[in-house]
Image (spheres, rainbow, N blue to C red):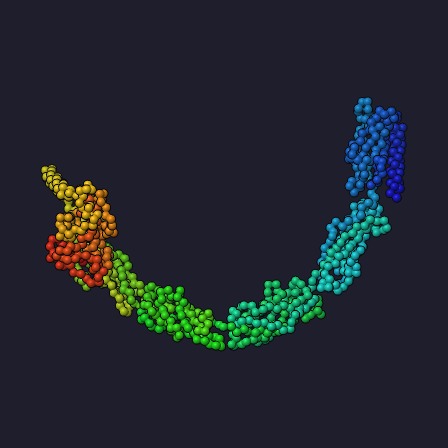
Amino acid sequence: KQRERWGRGIGLALLALLSEAQGHMDRAKTEEESGAGLLRRVKRGWVWNQFFVLEEYTGLEPLYIGKLHSDMDLGDGSIKYILSGDGAGTTFTIDDSTGDIHAIKRLDREVKAQYLLRAQAWNRQTDRPLEPESEFIVKIQDINDNEPKFLEGPYQATIPEMSTIGTEVIRMTATDADDPTYGNSARVVYSILQGQPYFSVEPKTGVVRVSLAGMDREVRENYSVIIQAKDMGGQLGGLAGTTVVNITLSDVNDNPPVFDQKLYQMSVPESAPVSSVVGRIRAKDRDIGINAEMRYSIIDGDGRDTFDINTDPTNLFGIITIKKPLNFETKASYTLKIEGANTHLDHRFPDKGPFSHVTIVHVSIEDVDEPPEFSLATYYIEVPEDTEISTVFMTVSARDPDAANTSIRYSIERNTDLGKYFYIDITSGALMTVLPLDREEFSWHNITVLAMEMNNPRMIGSVSVAVKILDVNDNPPLLTQYFESFVCESANAGQLIQTVTAVDADDPLGGHHFYYSLALEAANNPNFTLRDNQDNTAWILTRRGGWSQQDQSVYYLPIFISDGEQPVQTSTSTLTIRVCSCDVEGNVMSCNAEAYHLPASLSRGALIAILACIFVLLVMVLLMLSLQSHRKKPYLHDEEDNVHENIVRYDDEGGGEEDTEAFDIAAMWNPREAHLVGKQRQDMLPEIESLSRYVPLASVGGPGSGCGGGDSNVQGYVLSKLLEADLNPCAPPYDSLQTYAYEGEGSVAESLSSLQSGCSNTDHEYDYLNDWGPRFKKLAEMYGVLETNNPPMW
């Protein structure tokens, strides 16, 4: 059949070609005859128009397309035919002598429907074209060689279960590559090969529809349908293509939920905290997704107020939790009636309901040994800070909640009372103080009281006790600042010197109110007065003018301060007032006493005399120093002749204060007589150095240098003298000076050491030092009461 079809097609093509060529020749001859007497022109010698050829030629020889011929071709081979354009040389060839055209490749209309070619006749001798180039078309005629194809297959479709008959599932289209304008090669008809009786397909449109009602997803969820598309209008001999449609039934809520059991048994210990889980239940539903989601509720039972039920995040399970604390001794079991219902209902299927189910849950409470419970969740108490030690200020109470009701023992958790201010009675729970309370140190005490069962020490309950310390007026007011002020020499009477304020560590309810006045010993002083401003401040005013640093440079003014609370607290603070030189605006220039200036009008002779006296004094001082160095020269640096070094090495002791030959004890009488030398002896070093050697001279008389206050000046003075001796290269041996520097066996003053009396709480009187002679004059000046004509301090 194929060969017959090819032969018939070729014959028709050649016939058309010959008829068309004959028509061209007749028209050319007529034109030539009609125009012979007018004008002679070159005739168009091509005998052709367009060629037709069927696709898919399968013969072994090249397919003959047609023949090109020029009138100028006399058959002597002088003309050469040339072919160019689409497919020339690759798909089509021409015999350059005869003009025969052949197809050397298989032609496919679906690949290319026509080819545009150009032909020209050339003179072989002159190699020049005989006529202009002309175009012609080779058209490929279609045959039914392509089956319909589903380009988007396989297909997926989803429809709800229980869909009615005729519900559209999917619309499909098959594509045929053949020419739809030529015969029935591209006319497609659809049919179903697999999927009946559930589905059907419309023959012309390719729409798949439901053909069986009541399809249930819970019975069968997936279907595979095969659809065929056939060309030639479905006739015999047409080509066909198939595809698969996978159809899935989506879920609808057409099944009610059902509990597996009519009665559930659960248990929970009574110690379980609120919101803890007791158990979970589930009403199963054959549906899926949102159609299976549940809502649970307690609709009845004696445990409605004690328990609660919630849906888990998947909306499938019901979680039973504790709403209130449990107590086995009060109630040992509960009954719950629980309903589970669908949350999403489909009103198309009311006959499938009801979409809810009910079950019973029995909850048993398990008895456990519970820790003691206090009567209150927290305790709060206010205690004055002056409460006496061992005062009971509160009693806490706890009991064993179990049926045994065992005895309770109380204690305080020590990490909450690190200072150990409180104590609790072990049996009664009475809280008392064991240390003095101070609100200014700790205004709150947060302690934890523990209650333990006697029979089971592991059972321990705890409670927080907040103790607020109430304020009591037990702190005196003190000056806030400005312990030192100044007055200008040019100040007049009534001038403001300083505004003083006070501070009190107490915190009275009505606020602070301070009262200021001068101390009794300074109340009538002629220099300064104090004015209480009644606003917790006071002014220091001058009573006179004419101040002078030469007369007195410093005044000490004692100020008496009292508060307004009960019991009244008072204090006396001393304000130091210095006399200073000020400029005209009252700014301080200098607060030191100025040296006496010589008149600027001294004569030259007077100045020479003064300089001469100073020179003589310097010479005398140098002579004295030279004599003193010769006196100390016997201390040799030679190791063999150094007697004192030998004494140190063999621990020989001196004779104490009576031994006046070993060293010059006069150096200890006055600390200003010795000259410090900043270089230690190089020929001998002590085996044990005393820490007192590093006490500076400036420490003498310093405040707070010992636990006895001013008594430490004695020790400081001796240590400073010891430092002078250590730094002096001509000093006597170290052991002698260190051992016997404080006292001597034959001293009329007996022991002067402060080592045993420096921390005494008694006050010492040093007036007797004035009677001990010139050796103790310095000590008498430092500690004794001397008769002086000094001006008053205030």
Q: Is residue 746 above or below residue 360?
A: above
* Residue closest to the eye, 328 or 614: 328
* Residue closest to the eye, 359 or 340: 359
Q: Tag count in the figure?
A: 0
Q: Is residue 722 visible?
A: no
Residue extending farthest to the top is: 125
Residue at image point 78% right, 41% down: 111
Q: Is residue 104 above or below residue 253?
A: above
Residue at image point 85% right, 49% down: 237
Q: Is residue 105 above or below residue 366?
A: above
User: Which quadrant of the structure image shows residue 158?
Assistant: bottom right
**Quadrant of the drawing holding the C terminus:** bottom left
Residue at image point 45% right, 73% down: 455
Q: Position of residue 247 (x, y in %)?
A: 73, 57
**Quadrant of the drawing holding the N terminus:** top right
User: Which quadrant of the structure image shows residue 705?
Assistant: bottom left
Q: Position of residue 540 (x, y in %)?
A: 23, 58
User: Which quadrant of the structure image shows residue 417?
Assistant: bottom left
Q: Position of residue 349 (x, y in %)?
A: 71, 67
Q: Is residue 337 above or below residue 293?
A: below
* Side of 101 relative to 523 (left or right): right
Residue at image point 44% right, 73% down: 454
Q: Position of residue 273 (x, y in %)?
A: 51, 69
Q: Is residue 661 visible?
A: yes
